[in-house]
Image (spheres, rainbow, N blue to C red):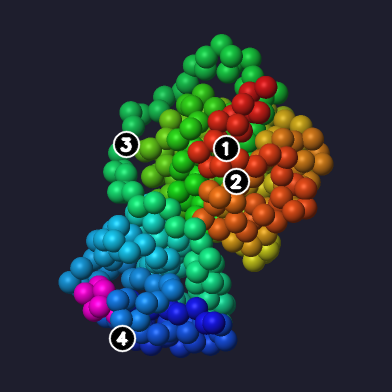
Amino acid sequence: MKIRVLVIDDSALMRGLLTEMINSAPDVEVVGAAPDAVIAREMIKALNPDVLTLDVHMPKMDGLEFLDRLMRLRPMPVVMVSSFTGAGSETTLKALELGAVDFIGKPRADGAKRIEEYAEELIEKIRAAKGARLRHHVAPAPVTTLPTKAPMTPAPLATARLGAGGKIIFLGASTGGTEAIKEFLMAIPADCPPILVVQHMPESFTASFARRLDGLCAPRVMEAQGNEKVEPGTVYIAPGHSHLQIRRTAAGYVTELLATPPVNRHRPSVDVLFDSAAALVGRQAVGVILTGMGKDGAQGLLRMRQAGARTFGQNEASCVVYGMPREAFLIGAVEEQWALEEIGKRVLQAAIR
């Protein structure tokens, strides 16, 4: 049976383009297209679609307001279609908090991605959304700014564990990962080991993502720019335009960005980060793979475990999409599986021993 999709967008041109792309797949079909949320609400009742694609900015009712009501009254898989702007990325992150499964940028006329590649990515996200586990609806957390995060004086235990030879946490995620990473970091104290993160998202989104986490979490969170000293109490988010890896220097570890071709169709790639951890950090590394579609990170996590690192995966029941963690588990890369609400504490325990 085909996956039934309702397209919601105020632009007739965009509705037509998305419909044509989606209908090009043999297992997916557009059953309706709505220009606004009011009409969409009636079409959902009449057509009972499996997945929605939803524009962020629409007349009559904003996409976020519509999503908020939908996830409270009739939860269903939603893929947001967002513009590649600063405001668009902030709104999209709020949509993911409200329960949207995933997002994709709007097709661009600048040739940044061929139309065939865009269509393939869109269809892949719709397929994943159909099988995704929907999270319970929660109101979006306000973006607050914590007091300026001054250099920390770690507690005596942390000082003993996180010195020059201290451990480093390496984390990868994809679909569902923005909220999973947030929950993971909310369980992590300010004096945590250094954490390097790859989340699959476009380059215009990662800076907003890092700022949002920095306002919500105790550790300092930043988008990596390359050549930052890897220090305790800091989380480094891979920018959407480059691979992130770790590099050893005479003064200690630093971040390094690579503009090399995508790996597993992704840049940044979790495998690139994990491979650098296996090669350079070895037993002093802790690897974590969270919810996500595909298999990026599985082989890299296996190499980390073979190099002596502790490795953790999110369990199936708490994943939005049990893809990347499943692939890692099946090949023996995952030492322990935990639910999302537990994995942060377990990883921290492993990192300070």
Type of amino acid at the residue the image marks with label 2: Gln
| C-alpha separation, residue under disc 1 versus residue under disc 4 | 45 Å
At a point 33% along the width and 49% down the height, the residue shown is 138
Q: Which residue is label 3 attached to?
A: 145
Mark 1 vs mark 2: which is more N-terminal? 2
Distance from disc 3 to disc 2, alpha carbons, whole Å, reads 29 Å
Q: Secondary structure at mark 3?
A: loop
Q: Position of residue 301 (x, y in %)?
A: 72, 47
Residue of label 2: 314
Which mark is drawn over residue 343? 1
For the residue carrying disc 3, how many other residues have a C-alpha within 10 Å: few (<14), some (14-19), or many (20+)?
A: few
Return the disc, 1 or 4, that comes first in the chain's sequence.
Answer: 4
Q: List the residue tagged with mark 4.
A: 12
Amino acid type assigned to the residue bearing label 4 in the image: Ala
Q: Residue at x 55, y 31 (%)?
A: 345
Can residue 115 be seen here?
Answer: no
Q: Are marks 3 and 4 in contact (CB under 8 Å)?
A: no
Amino acid under disc 3: Thr
Q: Are marks 1 and 2 in contact (CB under 8 Å)?
A: yes
Which one is earlier in the sequence, the residue at label 4 or at label 2? 4
Image location of residue 20, percent across then percent down: 46, 88
